[in-house]
Image (cartoon, rainbow, N blue to C red):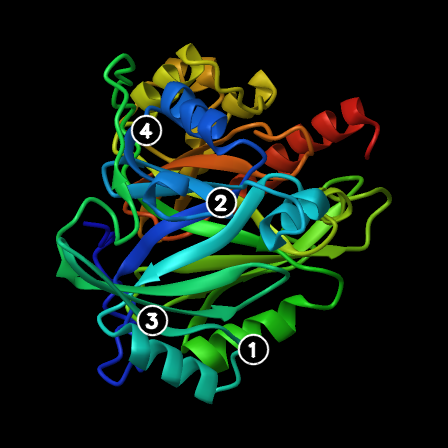
Amino acid sequence: MNTILAPDQSLVNANDFLPLEGTDYVEFYVGNAKQAAHYYMSAFGFQALAYAGPETGLKDRVSYVVRQHKLTFMLTTPLRTNNPIADHIYKHGDGVKVLALRVPDAALAWKETTARGASSSMEPVSLKDEGGEVVMSGIHTYGDTLHLFIERKNYNGVFMPGFRAWSNPLFAPADTGLLYVDHCVGNVDWNQMNPRVKFYEEVMGFKNILSFDDEDISTEYSALMSKVMSSGNGYVKFPINEPAEGKKKSQVEEFLDFYQGEGVQHVAMATNDIVKTVKDLMSRGVEFLKVPSSYYEDLLSRVGKIDEDLEPLRELGILVDRDNEGYLLQLFSKPVEDRPTLFFEIIQRKGAKSFGKGNFKALFEAIEREQEARGNL
């Protein structure tokens, strides 16, 4: 199912009160779920999986679920106004509402986190159908974003109770090699990074495994700060970004302005062959940021020997960075909504456990060129 990376043994704690098994799914609130589902199938290679709506007993919304390997997205649309989902979309535009986390015991996850100060969004509830039982619970995190805890050890249905299998025999998307959620990045408001870090530490038992200040993440014009939070076993990682003072508006400020609040900035999706994956995605219309060709002139002297040929990386704009454990390759899409908010990262790890610190300057200069074109720098 959706269990992802092997745990970082240095993070494992036998007394972990919130053992997370990975990202179960990511739910997006969108203006038209049917069209959004087809976008993720046609552009990113997801396959149709499940549907819920009036035909399955839901009266206020429809949800389409798509999957590729262990990566599951749910696209949800309201059917009427005067609806919390409609209000969310009106304020934020299309974006991530739920980061659902797999747990062995959803009731216990809710009990432990709310006892430590989390605000409940859903008390534990048991859902049953012929496929078995799914237990869900939930808490609030930054902005209007929710964490749902999903327990599905006693379920073998298509997705969860209330959904039916969904397929489109006339549409057969190709596998683009996207495997699982590597990490999800949240953008928070001025002076809110440390309180959010404290939330993840105290409420969810996460550890701050990496920190970047405005000296690390800055260009001539803008800057931001970031701290990477990891679950006790290393399966789930949430970098938290905050704007920092600069000459002009940073990418985090632009996000906060257009999203009208804190929220998920990007979802990083893992692949085992980034060159093939990016070629496939580009051929299907996904647009990516481009760094200047000069980035590659001294790349090997900066990162050392790599397995990949340099020319395909240069041609596709793929970035490379190294840490003490190995290296990684990464590339960032342009925003996938009309508002300059949500985007995606494609990442391949060759041992590295970091997040591309050596690429920050080149990446953020590329983002600034896009901001300038939009008149938002």
Residue identifier under label 4: 46
Q: Amino acid at mark 1?
A: Lys
Look at discs 2 and 1 and give the one toward the viewer.
2
- The secondary structure type at the circle numbered 3 is strand
Question: Of label 4 and label 3, which has the lower sequence position?
Answer: 4
User: Foreground: 324 or 78?
Assistant: 78
Q: Amino acid at mark 4?
A: Phe
Cα distance, mark 4 to mark 3?
29 Å
User: Foreground: 196 or 226?
Assistant: 196
Cα distance, mark 1 to mark 3?
28 Å
Question: Of label 2 and label 3, which has the lower sequence position?
Answer: 2
User: Foreground: 264 or 197?
Assistant: 264
Q: Is residue 156 left or right of residue 29?
A: left
Horizontal and vertical percent for residue 19? 28, 73
Residue identifier under label 3: 125
Q: Amino acid at mark 2?
A: Arg
The residue depicted at 25 percent of the width and 41 percent of the height is 164
Q: Residue furthest bottom?
A: 115
Horizontal and vertical percent for residue 172? 26, 16
Cα distance, mark 2 to mark 1?
34 Å
Residue identifier under label 2: 61
Cα distance, mark 1 to mark 4?
35 Å
Q: Residues within 10 Å of mark 3 (few under 14, many from 20)?
A: few
Residue 279: name its quadrant. Answer: top left
Q: Residues within 10 Å of mark 1 (few under 14, many from 20)?
A: some
Q: Residues within 10 Å of mark 4 (few under 14, many from 20)?
A: many
- The secondary structure type at the circle numbered 2 is strand
The residue depicted at 51 percent of the width and 57 percent of the height is 239
Look at discs 1 and 3 and give the one toward the viewer.
3
Residue 6: name its quadrant. Answer: bottom left
Residue identifier under label 1: 198
Question: Of label 1 and label 4, which has the lower sequence position?
Answer: 4
